[in-house]
Amino acid sequence: MHLLVIIRFIAILTIFLGISMGLPLGVSLVFRDGSSIAILTSSLVTTLIGLIIFLLIKKQDRVSLSHRDAVAIVSLGWMTSGLLGTLPYLFSGSIPDFTNACFESISGFTTTGASIITDVEGLPQSILLWRSLTQWLGGMGIIVLSIAILPYLGVGGMQLYRAEIPSPVVDKLKPRISETAKTLWKVYVLITFMEIILLYAGGMPFFDSVCHSFCTMPTGGFSTKNASIAHFNNQYFDFVFIIFVLLAGINFSLHYRLIKGNLSVFGKDSECRVFLILTGIFILVITFDIYGSIYSSLTTSFRYAAFQVSSIITTTGFVTADYDKWPALSQLILLICMFIGAMAGSTGGGIKIMRIMLLIRHTYHEIFRVIHPRAVTSVKLGGNPVPANVLSSIWGFFILYIGLFILATLIMAAMGLDTVSAIASVAASIGNIGPGLGVVGPVKNYLAIPVAGKWTLMLCMLIGRLEIYTVIVLFMPEYWRK
């Protein structure tokens, strides 16, 4: 392992994180919300920590990162961001408890959206923006941003990109990996800007438009309002959010191809078709399930079903209704959505549509081979054979995902949570969704979770955001052996 290169890279990430605190500092000065000194102190402390480490470590000759190096940088980078991201909360007094501040920070950077704050609207504007900014930075990935703007580091970027991008198959859009990262960030910024304009044009205050857009594209779900999007009770806003959370749940390489003129790219991509069709089916089933029992109007039922399904399956976590009071069938469908997640290559969490498609096709392939043992066949995606190592990786991921979910659920149940709350809290954390069911339902939060439970869920958030393998290997003795 290139230990000095790893530490130097983390130092640069730390400097960038400190500089990024300048945006909420500016907001604090404009609104005079009383948090200017706290934000400035947080920025200086973070920047100085990174700068001192950066200057103490001599720049290495150009090296090619090994996979172990990339895993360490990504995992430690996210952990460092989560820890230093607590400073604005602690110094401002918004969240004086370290565990709670760490929970809010890690939930932000992992784009989970689970919160311990009971009165969001009582926070200073600068802290509200910081919450949103942590999600926006975490969405496309601080690591990918670093690859895009810091090519002078002299380290190979592809391994880092593979370790960070939440996808079973990395889609390289440009010959140079730094150009691919820049392209993804340009698309990310463009769509975020479009949403800000549409929300503001519809009458949402500019500050709220920015904060909510910062939390839509990373499929984060933090809101500036206690009741989330339900606060606005506006059909136009609901429609805008539905469109943009679905866009955020689609592979960003498809957005790039659409912008380049391939207008039929969504329809031609098999994963995108399955994602949209599945979402539509879930919306229709829930619409008719809650029609009559919860809402008297079919259009109202469709409106709330469409929003909740789109928000949960993309792992965004915005809410406009208390689905904890919906019929069991609707709740189960939303729970299933938490596991399914969005498309590979999107900012969403969960198992991902592509993995589920390949698991089903591989299962069918094995059944087919039992019937036709001499047939020569292969599992295909988009007309192309899927390599055996990719299938093995997906099965390993699936087993680890379910295994860790069961283990964490047992831990939460042992701490006194009821069955529904234990299952939902872990599913919502490892899937990076945020709101769950029971004591962590859409109109509640995670404040009542025991301290040990919060640290368990924080680990689940990191594991889910970094696609399990990147975190799990750190606990393997083989990883640390030469």
Image (cartoon, helix red, strand yellow):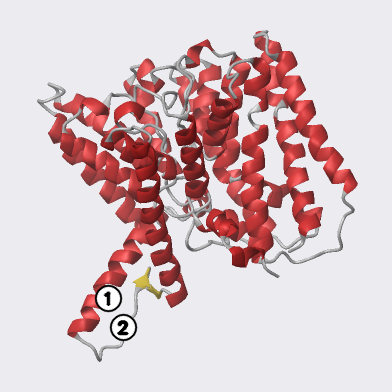
For badge 1, the amino acid type reads His
Q: Mark 2 and mark 1 in contact? Answer it, CB < 8 Å.
A: yes
Image location of residue 265, percent across then percent down: 42, 56
| Image position of 142 (left or right of 305) | right
Residue depicted at x 59% and y 33%: 134
Residue depicted at x 60% and y 20%: 127
| Image position of 166 (left or right of 341) | right
Q: Assign a secondary structure to mark 1.
A: helix
For badge 2, the amino acid type reads Thr
Image location of residue 78, percent across then percent down: 62, 44
Where's the C terminus, which quadrant?
Answer: bottom right
Q: Assign a secondary structure to mark 2.
A: loop
Where's the N terminus, which quadrant?
Answer: bottom right
Q: Nearer the viewer, residue 30 or 475?
A: 475
Image location of residue 313, percent across then percent down: 34, 43
Q: Which residue is mark 2?
A: 377
Q: Residue furthest bottom?
A: 374
State the CA–CA distance, disc 2 to disc 1.
8 Å
